[in-house]
Image (cartoon, rainbow, N blue to C red):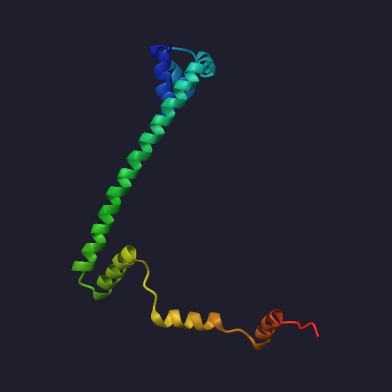
């Protein structure tokens, strides 16, 4: 079972904000003894568990903050789409909202042009394809 000082060392090490010498002082031990604690299997397991707990807590906090900031950004874009004095900004914001919701709108002319370009092949390529499928008679 870990002592109070060892548990404090686990907490301070998992935070990663202090040097080993400072942690040792705070835990009323020597840097050499702190090194020995780090070799102890129970200490290592406790440190690994606590580090993982902190990492997961930070990830959850970060995701929550990003969601809040994302909602604020969406509100700002909606505000621009509704209240901007510039028609261009209103249109750009509206297009962004539309494309974010339903996917990017493809210009019909662009779509047709791409299909025409993609479908053109040369006469040589066409003849080469036909030769692959010629039936050979046994006469």
Outermost left residue:
83
> Residue at (27%, 73%) from the top-left corner?
91
Q: Which of 7 and 27 is in front in this view?
A: 7
Q: Is residue 20 in view from this perspective?
A: yes
**Disc count in the image?**
0
The quarter of the displayed image where residue 138 is located: bottom right
Say above or below: 122 vs 83: below
Q: Is residue 18 in view from this perspective?
A: no
Q: Quadrant of the C terminus?
A: bottom right
> Residue at (19%, 67%) from the top-left corner?
82
Q: Which of 95 and 14 is in front in this view?
A: 95
Q: In this view, does 100 lie to the left or right of 124?
A: left
Outermost bottom residue:
123
Q: Which of 11 and 46 is in front in this view?
A: 46
Say above or below: 39 vs 15: above
Q: Residue 128: percent from the left, percent from the top?
A: 70, 82
Outermost right residue:
139
Q: In which quarter of the image is the N terminus?
A: top left
Q: Residue 31: percent from the left, percent from the top?
A: 51, 16
Q: Nearer the viewer, residue 22 or 42?
A: 42
The quarter of the displayed image where residue 73 is located: bottom left
> Residue at (41%, 34%) from the top-left corner?
55
Q: Residue 134: percent from the left, percent from the top?
A: 71, 82
Outermost front residue:
139
Q: Is residue 130 left or right of residue 115?
A: right
The quarter of the displayed image where residue 3 is located: top left
> Residue at (47%, 26%) from the top-left corner?
48
């Amino acid at each position: 079972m870990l002592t109070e000082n060892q548990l404090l060392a686990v907490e301070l090490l998992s935070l990663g904000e202090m040097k080993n010498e400072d942690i040792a002082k705070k835990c009323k031990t020597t840097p050499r003894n702190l090194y020995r604690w780090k070799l102890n299997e129970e200490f290592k397991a406790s440190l690994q568990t606590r580090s993982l707990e902190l990492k997961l807590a930070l990830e959850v906090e970060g995701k929550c903050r990003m969601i809040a900031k994302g909602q604020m950004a969406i509100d700002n874009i909606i505000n621009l789409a509704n209240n901007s004095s510039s028609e261009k900004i209103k249109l750009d914001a509206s297009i962004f909202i539309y494309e974010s919701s339903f996917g990017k709108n493809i210009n019909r002319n662009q779509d047709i042009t791409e299909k025409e370009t993609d479908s053109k092949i040369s006469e040589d390529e066409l003849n080469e394809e036909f030769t692959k499928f010629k039936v050979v008679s046994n006469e």
